[in-house]
Amino acid sequence: MAKAISILDTPKTGLAGLKQNWQYDAMSGFLVFLIALPLCLGIAMASNFPPQAGIITAIIGGLLVSRINGSFVTINGPAAGLIVVIFDSVQELGKGDAMAGYKYTLAAIVCASVIQTLMGYFKAGKLSAFFPSSVVHGMLAAIGIIIMSKQIHTLLGVKPDAKTLFETIGQIPHSFVELNPEVALIGGIGLVILIVWSFLKNRYLKMIPAPLVVVLVGLALGQYYDLEHEHIYMFLHDDPILPHHEYTIGPKFLVAIPEHFAAGFSFPDFSLIGTLEFWEQVITICLVGSLESLLSAAAVDKLDTYKRYSDLNRDLTAVGIGNTISGLVGGLPMIAEIVRSSANINNGGRTAWANFFHGAFLLIFVALFPRLIHEIPLASLSALLVFTGFKLASPKEFAKTMAIGYEQLLVFVITILGVLATDLLIGVVIGMIAEFIVHVLRSVDWHEVLKLYFEVKETEPGRYHIRVDGAAFFANFLSLKSELSALPEGKTLIFDLSEAETVDHTVMEFIHEFCEDYERRGGHSEMRGLERHTAASDHPLAARKRK
């Protein structure tokens, strides 16, 4: 039987925590560094940034943000979810000039990060609850589709002749026909390794990070095919069916990185700061980055062995400060990245010093072994991103959303189509409008969606009654969330939804997670009145309407 963790077992923080747990955090930080290195490179290149930009971001996230943030086991660094935002910014602001777009985007990152810092300072962390769950998941699924559609071409060693996203998707069959066999083999083997690793049960093999295996195999195949030197090779030259037999191979299929770390720094160009298109990118970077970071930090808290809770406002402030510095020296925006944070917990990381060690190992490696990074094939990094994109947009995500209710699946799909057809910001707005319409159609009185009526009352010492009336949905329950956050711990909470006309999935999910968190901290909670409602599906958190 597992030993229960008491508050006395909780690791210390600060220098005392370093002294107490350095061996656990250093080992976990090293293992996370092995995962982070290829992902940082791949995310930067997919974002149309220089490869070293991703490493710069993770180093700042580790060495600086870990010392001032409000979380315990999160790992800060560039994330796949921001690839689309940054890539579009480089394209829009650069007007075809990648270097100019890069520098303009750095300026947009700095401005967005200053706003992000102020949001944290003025305690805007709760605003993440304003976005409906199905819209957020739809946005992430759309990002996954975009990542896959763009990275498949790099994995195959082909550059598509496409200007729009839909043209890029339409070019995929052509890229399979025109694939570069040796490059595609490197990428294909990397993808197979990631798929096989996800099904492994052996705990010793699972301790080896799959991205590390992909990179090591890619390095070996890159040496075997001599990617370092440009040359032409023949493939199946005796086959009368295949029309093309000659293929070019060379350094353009490898990561290009400066020999000296300092040479990788770049500085922002603020000359477009007076234009509307510049501020459109600022708002998008700030909104998507803040939302992803807050959601990830909250999700990681649920995985924390010691059941600690992040100060999300302080965390947002710290990430904003880190992003400001990152943008000033040529890096990407960072978030509290959930995959690397999960790996940190699984590898025994106990405090924020694991994040610090992960950044330190990255700095040491890129400073001492830049040549080794240059030998990594781009196809191996593309395999990592294609796999990441698939996880964001896998059929499981559609099935999970459908299980909550068909109206949530509708909002989910509308958000995906909105993002693919327009951009992230407009797509999210389209999804929120769809959610709003669905809720209005379900509500008895249209005016009820404008304000949530509730009462929080201490009926007897240590016992609080929370009554919700009218229509409770994503856009009107922030006041309830604020009221609940002020309740003392260790009490009994009674949620009474018997008089609520409708309760949407986002509110159901929030109340459920709030009750779980409250009970983990020693309190007790009950939910009453749901028997008076009809659920949209059999899912326990499905939207409900009063009978």
Image (cartoon, rainbow, N blue to C red):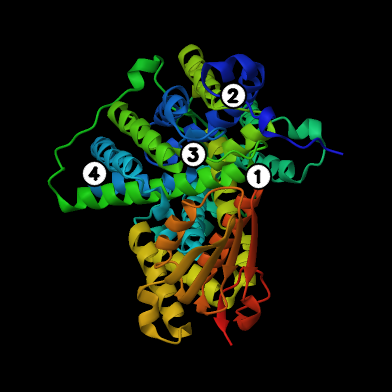
Residue lying at the far top in this picture: please name it: 368
- Mark 3 neighbour class, 10 Å CA radius: few under 14, some 14 to 19, many 20 or more: many
User: Which residue is under mark 3?
Assistant: 336
Badge 3 element = strand
Q: Is residue 517 left or right of residue 314?
A: right
Indicate which label's residue lies in the foreground, 4 or 1: 4
Indicate which label's residue lies in the foreground, 4 or 3: 3
Counting residues from the start of the chain, the first of labels 3 and 2 encountered is 2
Q: Residue at x 58, y 27 (%)?
A: 351
- Mark 2 neighbour class, 10 Å CA radius: few under 14, some 14 to 19, many 20 or more: some
Q: What kind of residue is marked 4? A: Gly
- For residue 303, the mark is none
- Mark 4 neighbour class, 10 Å CA radius: few under 14, some 14 to 19, many 20 or more: some
x then y, percent, for residue 161: 39, 53
Q: Is residue 381 above or below residue 451?
A: above
C-alpha separation, residue under disc 3 versus residue under disc 2: 21 Å
Badge 1 element = loop
User: Which residue is under mark 2?
Assistant: 12
Q: What kind of residue is marked 2? A: Lys
Total marks drawn?
Answer: 4
Counting residues from the start of the chain, the first of labels 1 and 3 encountered is 1
Q: Residue at x 39, y 14 (%)?
A: 260
Q: Nearer the viewer, residue 536 or 227?
A: 536
Counting residues from the start of the chain, the first of labels 4 and 1 encountered is 4
Indicate which label's residue lies in the foreground, 1 or 3: 3
C-alpha separation, residue under disc 4 versus residue under disc 1: 45 Å
Q: What kind of residue is marked 1? A: Asp
Q: Is residue 146 left or right of residue 383?
A: left
Q: Is residue 509 above or below residue 255?
A: below
- For residue 238, the mark is 1
